[in-house]
Image (tube, helix red, strand yellow):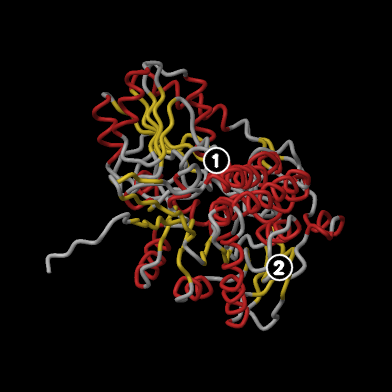
Amino acid sequence: MMQMSTQRPAEDLLRAAPDVVPQASHHVAGGFVEDAAGAPIPVIYPASGTEVARLHEATPDIVERALAAAEAALPAWRAMRGAERGRILRRAADIIRERNRALSELETVDTGKPLSETLVADALSGAEALDYFGGMAATLTGEHLALGEDWAYTIREPLGVCVGIGAWNYPIQIACWKAAPALACGNTMVFKPSEMTPLSALKLAEILTEAGLPPGVFNVVQGRGAVGAALVEDPRVDKVSLTGSVPTGRRVYAAAAAGMKHVTMELGGKSPMIVFDDADLENAVSAAINGNFYSSGQICSNGTRLFVQAGIHDAFVERLAQRVERALIGDPLDEATNFGPMVSAAQLGIALDYVGKGVEEGARLVTGGRRLDRPGFYMSPAVFAGVRDDMAIAREEIFGPVASVLKFGTEEEALQRANATEFGLAAAVFTRDLARAHRVASRFAAGTCWINTYNLTPIEMPFGGVKASGVGRENGRAAIEHYSQVKSVYVAMGDVEAPF
């Protein structure tokens, strides 16, 4: 039986800590700015459905001011020693850690994710990114190439003005994942959060400024698609990094390509998790819970296609249902809660529609999948069995707490079915046979893979997808390649020969 906790208003939290709420809609050139002429952006608390704050969309004047500030700040920032850039990023990481509680509460109010998650997985992950790339900033050098009597050298340079476009599921983490490598390399950035979760990126900009970041190096503007398009299409922009859906990614990628801009696209997925008969059942079920129901299923890399070998299939389904029904659903500001609301009424409707499609197409709804009779955007986590590969719930990204269990017989069959998708973000294999584990991982058509775990994304490890799931990589040293470029210089030590 799923448990539910009582709820306290988010408004009480915001009134008790007014300094937690950003001072204005945008942060440009080192300070907060407002333009009430912009369309309103209501901030809705997902646990109650009530408006807890209101911002304004960036007007053309705000967009222009942000881009001009980023362009003006670029020469001095790129000329600064990497060690000094790194110190600023690391100071910001320290401030984030000191204020993790307040930032986590703000993130919970903005997204609806349980505080038990945001305290450990959101702002702190952003701090890790700032620390990691801050430490790397002084090491970004070129190389010397001996060419007989002649020689050459390379210079690693920033790209210029970057635009970051965030998603609503991990607002401050995504802002840091984009800003940290960009700024470490000497770029400047204009960041647009999702209009659904606009608050914490503003606090990040405030913290970076407090840490010593020069005005204009990191700017935040709010808005919907039109604001994003204005940023992407501006000729002053050299790089675009998007986290979002595949349809949005295609539009942004095309717009960036028209201007020959560098891009990183971290998009959606329909990722497979293959569980063999010899897998540890409890570990596999735990991973399935993390890979389907953490953040109420609103994670791009989630392993929503659970391929389970026939010998363990029934036990897996039974155990997964048992543990899912133990979820404590309720007030996300209560640290005992481990399953919160979805981000919006629209996203809740999408997930519930897919539950209906699953039932209509003949899958067996083992547990959950219903809207809860309480304020806010709550549904019970759903587990389907008897799922076929051609069903909508097995083919299409839901971005909600809907898990599909599919039975398989052989390794070859599982791999063919796992890879038979337009997506290629992530994949996992569970087995005690490590030779098979590495063999299967090598054959996954996915950019990020796990063996006997799921959804761990340390900042040291590159993250990204293949096929429709994206272009480029975030995190790790690989991210440096996507926020910098190499200039080659040939040095001739002798005379120049010519044919005439």
Q: Residue at x 41, y 66 (%)?
A: 252
Q: Are marks 2 and 1 in contact (CB under 8 Å)?
A: no
The tag on residue 459 is 1
Camera-side residue: 13 or 310? Answer: 13
The tag on residue 30 is 2
Camera-side residue: 498 or 339? Answer: 498
Q: Quadrant of residue 404?
A: top left
Q: What quarter of the picture does the C terminus occupy?
A: bottom left
Marks 2 and 1, the one that precedes in the sequence = 2
Callout 1: few (<14), some (14-19), or many (20+) C-alpha neighbours within 10 Å?
A: many
Residue 331 shows in the view: no
The residue at the far front in this view is: 495
Q: Residue at x 58, y 76 (%)?
A: 68
Callout 2: few (<14), some (14-19), or many (20+) C-alpha neighbours within 10 Å?
A: many
The residue at the far right in this view is: 16
Q: What quarter of the picture does the N terminus occupy?
A: top right
Q: Quadrant of residue 117?
A: top right
Task: Work out how far the residue at label 2 is from the one at label 1, CA to CA, in angstroms.
Answer: 27 Å
Looking at the picture, how far across and down is residue 128, in whole percent? 63, 42
Q: Measured along the vertical axis of the image, is residue 35 above or below residue 346?
A: below
Q: Which of the two discs, 2 and 1, sits closer to the camera?
A: 2
Q: Residue at x 36, y 56 (%)?
A: 488
Looking at the picture, how far across and down is residue 106, in whole percent? 73, 53
Looking at the picture, how far across and down is residue 471, in whole percent? 38, 53
Give the side of residue 397 with respect to residue 167, left or right. Answer: left
Kind of element beneath mark 2: loop
Amino acid type indicated by mark 2: Gly
The tag on residue 222 is none
Amino acid type indicated by mark 1: Ile
Camera-side residue: 272 or 100? Answer: 100
Residue 67 shows in the view: yes
Looking at the picture, how far across and down is residue 202, in whole percent? 69, 62
